[in-house]
Amino acid sequence: MTVENDQLSLGTAAARKLATTTKTTPQMQGITSRWLLKLLPWVQVSGGAYRVNRRLSYAVGDGRVSFSVTGTRIRVIPPELGELPLLRGYEDLETLEAMAGRFLQRDFQPGDVIATEGEDADQVVLVAHGKLNRLGHGPYGDEAVLGLLADGDHFGDRALVEGGSWDCTVRAVTSGTVLTLSRQAFDELAASSDSLRAHLAAFRAGPSGAQDEYGEAAIHLSAGHHGEAALPGTFVDYEVSPREYELSVAQTVLRVHSRVSDLYNDPMNQTDQQLRLTIEALRERQEHEMVNNTDFGLLHNADLKQRIHTRTGPPTPDDLDELLATVWKEPSFILAHPQAIAAFGRECSKRGVYPSSADFGGQKVPAWRGVPMLPCNKIPVTTTRTTSMMALRVGEEQQGVVGLHQVGIPDEYQPSLSVRFMGISEQAIISYLVSAYYSVAVLTPDALGILESVELGH
């Protein structure tokens, strides 16, 4: 008689005691493709700082205005009025406080008209919240959308000193709020402020030199002439105080117990694996800083003229066309959060449009108008489910965006990344200082464009 539970051969659990398992190296979910680090041309910065010289520019006051909110009341922050071209450089805080208090709040609904083409332009309008379309007439009399105004934008400031009529109609796309200051209220304030009258006189006199369409000091030329015409003399003026980018650093101290490194290095070197994952985390943080750092990050260094808003919310083909138009001189690629790329795909599907793909780095990636769209999870998504998309032109020769680093630093382990032995503590813990040096520079404003307020909702 046999017993069913009697074991007739060696079991697998016991056999494994004599077997060597096949192992993977330690895995890490936080490792991403890091397209920005891979595709940026890197410039050697031997002195630790990189100076971007540009032609002298006379461009003034095209920034966005910020507001403070108390309950349902919205008030413009007084120093932010200096973002208006009319008030750029004006620093009399007492007068700015008085001016901010004279703005009137007006709520609007979709379809409301804020300004009508041809009517008297008698106020400056600040957009606190919402979206507005600037409307004009096409060549055959049909209505055409000339542009979009959204949070922080403004219009009509020149009307306060130059008068005239509105050159377009401004109509609300969504509900929102604007703040308005009438010409009468502005004139009353100017009559009581000597500093404001002096500033307005200087503004009317205009910049000290001629400028081209980009706001740069003009280079005088002559073309199409005949005979012995007198040729103009000229020179190219430069910015007196160009911007300098200093290399930033991401650092950490890696600690490994000597017993671990002595006894447990087969089949994998423990120190090498610890270092590998630490460097991956440092590179992830490096890309995050190059996108989000308030000093040199791309999201904070795009020129305000290069920032556009979506027309309706989700990223549509029209919005991507507008984005590429901001970087129309040989755009290299588009960076977007993976969810933004998915939202764009949904909008294309709705319209029966099928984006092409591009062979990029040996793999197929989505593309729009032949420009690759690459995922970057470092671009933040807000609590309201909105994000941004960036279009870049890269390279020094193209006057684009470049990465900055320094190769050849002491104890270099990878380009511009060092691993420095710091010693062994009394607890037999070995310490290594791991440092990565980097920055990113935008050589000309039109090398970087940003599509803002991109909604991700289904």
Image (cartoon, rainbow, N blue to C red):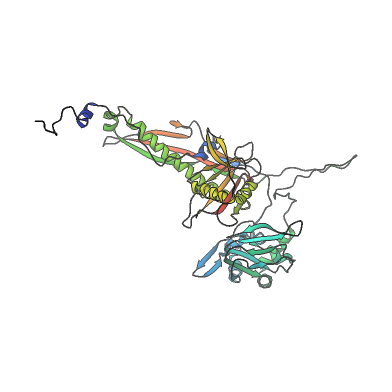
In this view, the residue farthest toward the front is 1
Is residue 410 among what the camera can see?
no
Residue 266 position, x and y percent, is 30, 27
Residue 52 position, x and y percent, is 61, 42
In this view, the residue farthest toward the right is 227
Is 274 drawn above or below residue 60 in the view shown?
above
Foreground residue among 152 and 368: 368
Is residue 277 among what the camera can see?
yes
Would residue 412 be found to the left or right of residue 452 on screen? left
Hey, which quadrant is residue 444 in on the image?
top right
Is 361 drawn above or below residue 140 in the view shown?
above
Quarter of the image with the N terminus is: top left
Would residue 149 be found to the left or right of residue 35 on screen? right
Hey, which quadrant is residue 29 in on the image?
top left
In this view, the residue farthest toward the left is 1
Foreground residue among 50 and 110: 110
The residue positioned 51% from the left and 46% from the top of the image is 291
The residue positioned 68% from the left and 67% from the top of the image is 115
Numbered marks: total: 0
Foreground residue among 274 and 328: 328
Foreground residue among 421 and 402: 402
Residue 317 position, x and y percent, is 60, 49
Residue 190 position, x and y percent, is 67, 69
Would residue 308 be found to the left or right of residue 268 on screen? right
Would residue 258 be found to the left or right of residue 64 on screen? left
